[in-house]
Image (tube, rainbow, N blue to C red):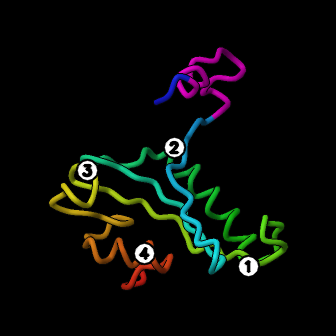
Amino acid sequence: MTPFSQWLRALPRPLDSSVYDNENLDYIWFNYRAGWLITIEEKRYGAQPTTAQMDTHRIVAQMLSLSSCHKLKTMRGERAIEYRGHYVIVFSHTCPDDSEWIKINNQESSRDDLMSLLQNGKLQHGW
């Protein structure tokens, strides 16, 4: 939570949670040379995304999927960018270095699986 996120969550009607869902997205991992990106939600200590957070992230992922591989304006000129998906990465502690286990999209995963995801924007096992 940041001061701004706390401020947003404290707004009165009609800007409160009866009308708006306020979620953040942790990472946009962009391989700008190869032209692909993924979105990542990080959870520590075995935490899980809330239903509202997952719903909002699914909406964003669907919108990115619909525009995937279409030409977009970038600082490198107009080019197609491929969206390779949304991944929820859960650590038993805080990161790969201190965790006993890692889950990617609810699947038991290894550090190698995580490294492959970061290098390729896809999981080896195709989950």
Residue position marked by numbered label 1 in the rendering: 69
Q: Position of residue 118 (x, y in %)?
A: 44, 72
Per the model, the C-alpha gap separating discs 3 and 4 is 20 Å
Residue position marked by numbered label 4 in the rendering: 117
Q: Residue furthest left?
A: 100
Tell me, for residue 46, which label it has, or none: 3
Q: In the image, is residue 11 part of the stretch drawn in magenta?
A: yes
| Mark before the other along the chain sequence, 2 or 1 | 2
The residue drawn where x is 54% and y is 63% is 29
Q: Quadrant of the C terminus?
A: bottom left
Callout 3 touching callout 4 (CB < 8 Å): no
The residue drawn where x is 50% and y is 76% is 121
Q: Position of residue 101 (x, y in %)?
A: 20, 62
Per the model, the C-alpha gap separating discs 1 and 4 is 19 Å
| Mark before the other along the chain sequence, 1 or 4 | 1
Residue position marked by numbered label 2 in the rendering: 52
Q: Is residue 119 left or right of residue 95?
A: right
The residue drawn where x is 62% and y is 27% is 18
Q: Describe the element under mark 3 as helix, strand or loop.
A: loop
| Mark before the other along the chain sequence, 3 or 4 | 3
Q: Is residue 124 left or right of residue 67?
A: left
Point out the frontmost of discs 1 and 3: 1
Point out the frontmost of discs 4 and 2: 4
Tell me if mark 4 has few (under 14), some (14-19) or many (20+) residues whose alpha carbon lies within 10 angstroms of its own: some
Magenta stretch: dominant SS? loop
Q: Report how many numbered discs are placed on residues in the image.
A: 4
